[in-house]
Amino acid sequence: MPAKKRTAVKKRPAKAAAPTAPSAPAVPDLPQGVLDLIARSNRLGSDPTITNYGGGNTSAKVRQLNPATGTEVELLYVKGSGGDLGTLTYAGLAAIERDRLVALDAQYRGVDHEDEMVGLFPFCSFGAGGATPSIDTPMHGLVDLDHVDHLHPDAVIALACSADGEKLVQKIWGGAVAWVPWKRPGWELGKTMRELSANPDVIGAVLGGHGLTAWGRTSAEVERRSKKIIREAQQYLDSASKPDPFGALVKSRTPLPEAGRRARAAQLFPHLRAVASADRRMVGHFTDSPVVLDFLSRRKLDKLVALGTSCPDHFLRTKVRPLLLDTPVGAPLEKVQARLAELHAEYRVEYQAYYDRHATASTPALRGADPAIILVPGVGMFSFGADKQTARVAGEFYVNAINVMRGAQGVSRYAPVSEADKFSVEYWQLEEDKLARRPKPKALAGKVALVTGGASGIGLATAELFAQHGACVVIADLDAAKAATVAADLGGPDKAVGVAMDVSDPDAVTAGLAEAVLAFGGVDIVINNAGITRAGSLADTSLRDWDLQYSIMPRGSFLVARAAEPVLRAQKLGGDIINVCSKNAVFAGPNNIAYSSAKAAQAHMVRLLAAELGDIGVRVNGINPDGVVRGSGIFAGGWGASRAKTYGVAEDDLGKYYAQRTVLKEEVLPEHIAKAALALTDGSLPITTGLLIPVDSGVTQAFLR
């Protein structure tokens, strides 16, 4: 076919300076086609009816100068492996010289060998090449039109996963949109797209069991075509669907009222997390949206759950099917636990059998036999992943699967790809290679840390450090607004949440722990840091001041530990409790009777809890800081002025005064205590419990004997 005209980029002078590496050019220097591609991708990726997180890919072909030869080349810019359309930037694009990619067709040895083609993609890179090319690259590169979209909209996948999908596609579009039976992504599918796109009357294709691909001469045209196909698919589903595609409502699965639902979810979540974490520690996400609750209350639930999820993007994140907890909505917890253990054992046996049925000598090792999605009728969906974002996205993908099932059942019968085809994607070596490229997990990845008094001072420093090392952090503080601000600064709901907690109030502690569990699935690390002080000699200390300090520190630590213990026990993952005590627990300064004795009680509690909780693998340790002046809410609240007066120094010099009385002559800062807490929880001291660590720069009188 005749060559098409494409907008050429103006040539540089032959002796121009070397260009910026493709991985990070200034956006204004990019060809217009690439700018259009990024803008289009961000629009498509931000619409949940069009695509889901990390799903789909888009591309553009442009002509650019090759600085090595001074001649123009046609480049394919395509979203790289593992990227997200909604947040795509230039750094997320793979840059490939298209003529070299197309020439690889001469090396293609057929569908049984198409995976080897991926290893040749880097030899087609332009310059540094940008992001890693994905397996979908041929679907873009072999099409002889400038712009291609490959998307996973629920409405189109509903047709792609219908038993009558081919007939429905013909009925809706009359040949303008082609039907392609299931093919695993790769070179063969790319060749099919090339053949279909050569027909000017065909604007795109529905890929059986997979999704949508559309093409166009301009970015605007392909975007318009993609949205048209999606819109018309949804219109057909809306107009042709039979009522109640999931069947009648089941009275025994009626959703609990919201308050009861959330209370039940918080009660069940640690037990479900134990199931999902038998092979490796997982973080959880809870969803009780109307879409989920309706699905869980319908007669056809059991049958549809057993059929598994629909397209590759779905089951790569959700596994081939969820675990359905089939106990009555109001069943006693003991019966739920017993049934859950049975279902989990059955699930693991079935998953192992699924692996054994399809694995060959070259198949990657089994990655774990625990469910990623657990469905609880009347309550909601619990999704799990290595981190909070992965858990949340897994849940979002199962919601996509529910939408697909509803659409398919409404106009036909839900018929996802075969088990063998699912396995061929789930345990695809190319997917294994993608997993291997992920960064090594941080020390606290997969752990949930609750920090009391977390909005300032030692608590804030600990929360920040733990978040940096991969933990999900719950900022528990009396000041809910400050806690929320800190959580937002740490990255928001996928990284941290703020909860209001008065540690002296049993009901507030219970409610705060429940919020923490609902946010992340459980709690692994408890930092009892909340504290207060009222200086005074025996004569000057009022009963109110005495009770206040005891209610926050020993009582607060007790209440938080007591509320956390059943969560830690249910998860079966061990854990850590750390009491932030004080060197005053060992060596008390003058005029400080209530604070010092309260801290001594906290310190002895460490020993008692360490002895009691060792049977469930929970380590309990304490940290004894000297006075932490800088950034401290306690010192800023009047304690600093009081201590400065006692020692006869200016308040601004109090930190220096404390430092000079130590062996190391160094001021103790919040980050020093945070680092001690990290050392106790990051695996560096895996069999240490009952320890009180001085972080005081060396106060000789406080040396432990």
Image (cartoon, rainbow, N blue to C red):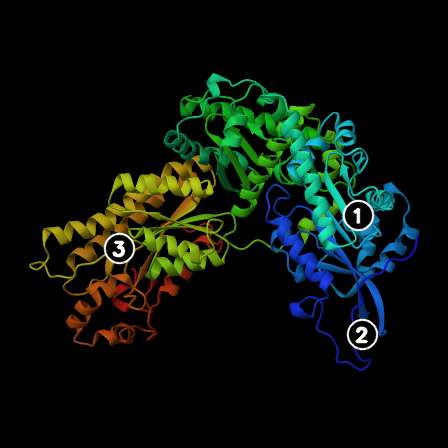
Regarding mark 1 in the picture, which secondary structure is present there?
helix
Q: Nearer the viewer, residue 438 or 293?
A: 293
Instruction: Give the x, y percent position of residue 121.
Output: 81, 56
**Which is in the foreground here, disc 3 or disc 2?**
2
**Residue wearing tag 2:** 11
Instruction: Give the x, y percent position of residue 356.
Output: 72, 31
The residue located at (17%, 67%) in the rendering is 642
Amino acid type of the residue that numbered disc 2 sits on in the rendered structure: Lys
The reply, left or right, for residue 324 in relation to residue 680 is right
**Residue wearing tag 3:** 531
Of the image marks 1 and 3, the number of the one nearer the N terminus: 1
> How far apart are the two marked residues, 3 and 2, measured between alpha carbons?
67 Å
Instruction: Give the x, y percent position of residue 570.
Output: 43, 35
**Residue wearing tag 1:** 139
Give neighbour class at mark 2: few <14, some 14-19, many 20+ (Cα, 10 Å).
some
Regarding mark 3 in the picture, which secondary structure is present there?
loop
The reply, left or right, for residue 659 in relation to residue 264 is left
**Which is in the foreground here, disc 1 or disc 3?**
1
Of the image marks 2 and 1, the number of the one nearer the N terminus: 2
Regarding mark 2 in the picture, which secondary structure is present there?
loop
The residue located at (54%, 47%) in the rendering is 389
Instruction: Give the x, y percent position of residue 582.
Output: 28, 59
**Which is in the foreground here, disc 2 or disc 1?**
2
Q: Nearer the viewer, residue 478 or 101?
A: 101
The reply, left or right, for residue 316 in relation to residue 297 is right
Residue at the farthest left position: 539
> How far apart are the two marked residues, 2 and 1, measured between alpha carbons?
29 Å
Q: Nearer the viewer, residue 14 or 559?
A: 14
Amino acid type of the residue that numbered disc 3 sits on in the rendered structure: Gly
The reply to whether dot 3 and dot 2 touch (C-beta < 8 Å) is: no
